[in-house]
Image: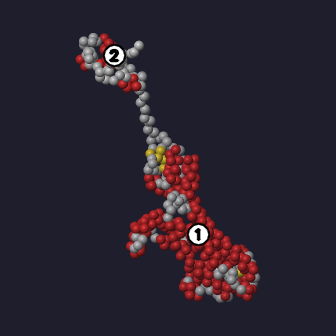
């Protein structure tokens, strides 16, 4: 541990200085030697660090979603070059470079917190050993050793013996009960955070190995916290429990307001947004405009939840614009084609089916009912000789078969004579 402490000694002084500044503020309220003053100082340190890490958290979200999108392509590369690991790695790196994706971006918040975590561990270990460290002098060291959180000293550990615990002014039972409870809460918060990510904010339309990895981590991380937690001081458990709770709340906010496309969270979000837009006729927030803009830009690549959202707006007489806004449509209800592209305008007239003719009309060439021919007055008054030759009907010639054509239902050509009836 001395080697690790020496590696992070450059940040030990800043961390101890921040803790002391918060301790001055809370000490004036709760008392300098109370566990509330020192415990809230550690909590405030976590909040300050996590606020500074928000840009990295946003980058982590984008990287995670980009990796989820690339999973089908990555799987194809693995299957294509399963016997050539070097070519497989080259194609993977090429894919990352083309899409601008960095797999390590999802680990940035954890990596950025590691120096602060080890620095705080070294500070609390120095308090337990009775050694001054950073800006913590002898008076602050004595005050920190007196501070207890629910009867457990800040520097006490689950595995400490009775002699060490009694030197800090506590009992072994109090220390183990408090540390065990904090370890359980720490593991439970980590499990819930990972489960929330898997059940609500994962694209359910694509089954990839990435989902299996996340599911495995959902059970591995809580076990790791439970195993390592028995070696952490109470102050470090306070730090880690606080950062887990912060991560859980931050993720709940992201899932509620900016869910992953294709996930259950997106379906619930678009349903809420559709109700609000239908009721008020406009988009209220910039983040909502950004999401609607992305949905409109997808076109035929929209998922089922996004198509349902666009169709719901069209049925309400609204139309989503390319800039993410929503305007009222004066045309009739819009529909959506099978490829996902919305089409607006009046509905096309239905095709009129022709009336069915009878058998006699089809064979005799008669016109359907309702269609009558009328002669104008000039035609009636005009003599037959004065009419054009084309209008005159030639008289049927004998033997020409005109009689057989006039009678419907008979075959053309000469008819076979009927046999005489027998009396």
The local crowd at label 2, few if under 14, some if 14 to 19, many if 20 or more residues have their Cα within 10 Å, is few
Determine the residue positioned at 67% across, 88% down: 130
Quadrant where the N terminus is found in the figure: bottom right
Q: Is residue 341 above or below residue 218?
A: above
Residue annotated with mark 1: 218
303 lies above or below 142: above
List the single residue furthest toward the front.
423
Image coords of residue 49 (percent x, y): 58, 73
* Residue 250 rendering spot, x and y as whole percentages: 59, 66
Measured from the top left, where is residue 269 in percent x and y? 56, 55
Q: Tell me the quarter of the picture where residue 381 sits.
A: top left
- Image quarter where the C terminus lies is top left
> Residue at left 41%, top 30%?
354
- Say whether residue 299 is left or right of residue 34: left
Mark drawn on residue 68:
none
Q: Please report contact status of discs 1 and 2: CB closer than 8 Å, yes or no.
A: no
Q: Is residue 171 left or right of residue 314?
A: right
Q: Residue at x 73, y 77 (%)?
A: 177
> How much space separates mark 1 and mark 2, taking CA atoms?
90 Å
The image shows residue 182, relative to residue 310, as above or below, that is: below
Question: Nearest the camera: 159 or 397?
Answer: 397
Number of marks in the image?
A: 2
Q: Which x, y percent locates residue 39?
A: 68, 76
Query: Closer to us: mark 1 or mark 2?
Result: 1
Q: Secondary structure at mark 1?
A: helix
Check disc 2 and report the residue beneath it. Answer: 376
Q: Look at the image and tell me whether residue 201 can be seen.
A: yes
Residue 58 appears in the rendering = no
Residue 304 or residue 111, whichever sits in front: 304
Upstream in the sequence, badge 1 or badge 2? 1
Q: Is residue 35 left or right of residue 312?
A: right
* Nearer-the-camera pick, 194 or 399: 399
């Amino acid at each position: 541990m001395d080697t690790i402490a020496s590696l992070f000694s450059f940040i030990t002084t800043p961390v101890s200085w921040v803790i002391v500044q918060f301790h001055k503020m809370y000490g004036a309220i709760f008392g300098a030697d109370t566990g509330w003053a020192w415990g809230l100082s550690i909590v405030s340190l976590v909040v300050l660090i996590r606020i500074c890490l928000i840009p990295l958290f946003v980058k982590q979200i984008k990287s995670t979603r980009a990796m989820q999108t690339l999973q089908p392509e990555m799987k194809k590369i693995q299957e294509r070059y399963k016997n050539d690991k070097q070519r497989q790695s080259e194609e993977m790196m090429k894919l990352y470079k083309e899409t601008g994706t960095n797999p390590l971006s999802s680990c940035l918040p954890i990596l950025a917190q590691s120096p602060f975590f080890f620095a705080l561990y070294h500070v609390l270990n120095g308090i337990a050993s009775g050694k001054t460290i950073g800006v913590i002098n002898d008076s602050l060291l004595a005050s920190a050793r007196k501070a207890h959180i629910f009867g457990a000293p800040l520097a006490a550990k689950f595995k400490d013996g009775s002699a060490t615990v009694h030197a800090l002014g506590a009992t072994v039972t109090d220390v183990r009960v408090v540390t065990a409870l904090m370890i359980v809460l720490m593991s439970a918060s980590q499990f819930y955070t990972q489960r929330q990510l898997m059940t609500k904010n994962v694209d359910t339309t694509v089954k990839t190995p990435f989902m299996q990895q996340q599911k495995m981590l959902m059970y591995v991380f809580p076990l790791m916290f439970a195993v390592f937690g028995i070696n952490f001081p109470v102050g470090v458990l306070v730090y880690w429990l606080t950062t887990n709770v912060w991560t859980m709340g931050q993720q709940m906010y992201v899932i509620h307001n900016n869910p992953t496309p294709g996930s259950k969270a997106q379906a619930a979000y678009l349903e809420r947004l559709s109700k609000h837009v239908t009721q008020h006729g406009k988009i209220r927030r910039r983040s909502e405009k950004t999401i609607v803009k992305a949905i409109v830009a997808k076109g035929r690549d929209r998922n089922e939840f996004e198509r349902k959202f666009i169709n719901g707006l069209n049925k309400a007489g609204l139309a989503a614009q390319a800039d993410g806004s929503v305007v009222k449509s004066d045309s009739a209800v819009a529909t959506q084609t099978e490829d996902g592209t919305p089409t607006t305008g009046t509905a096309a007239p239905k095709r009129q089916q022709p009336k069915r003719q009878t058998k006699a009309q089809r064979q005799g060439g008669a016109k359907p009912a309702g269609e009558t021919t009328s002669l104008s007055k000039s035609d009636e008054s005009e003599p037959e000789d004065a009419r054009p030759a084309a209008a005159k009907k030639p008289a049927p010639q004998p033997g020409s078969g005109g009689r057989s054509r006039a009678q419907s239902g008979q075959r053309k050509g000469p008819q076979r004579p009927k046999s005489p009836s027998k009396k």
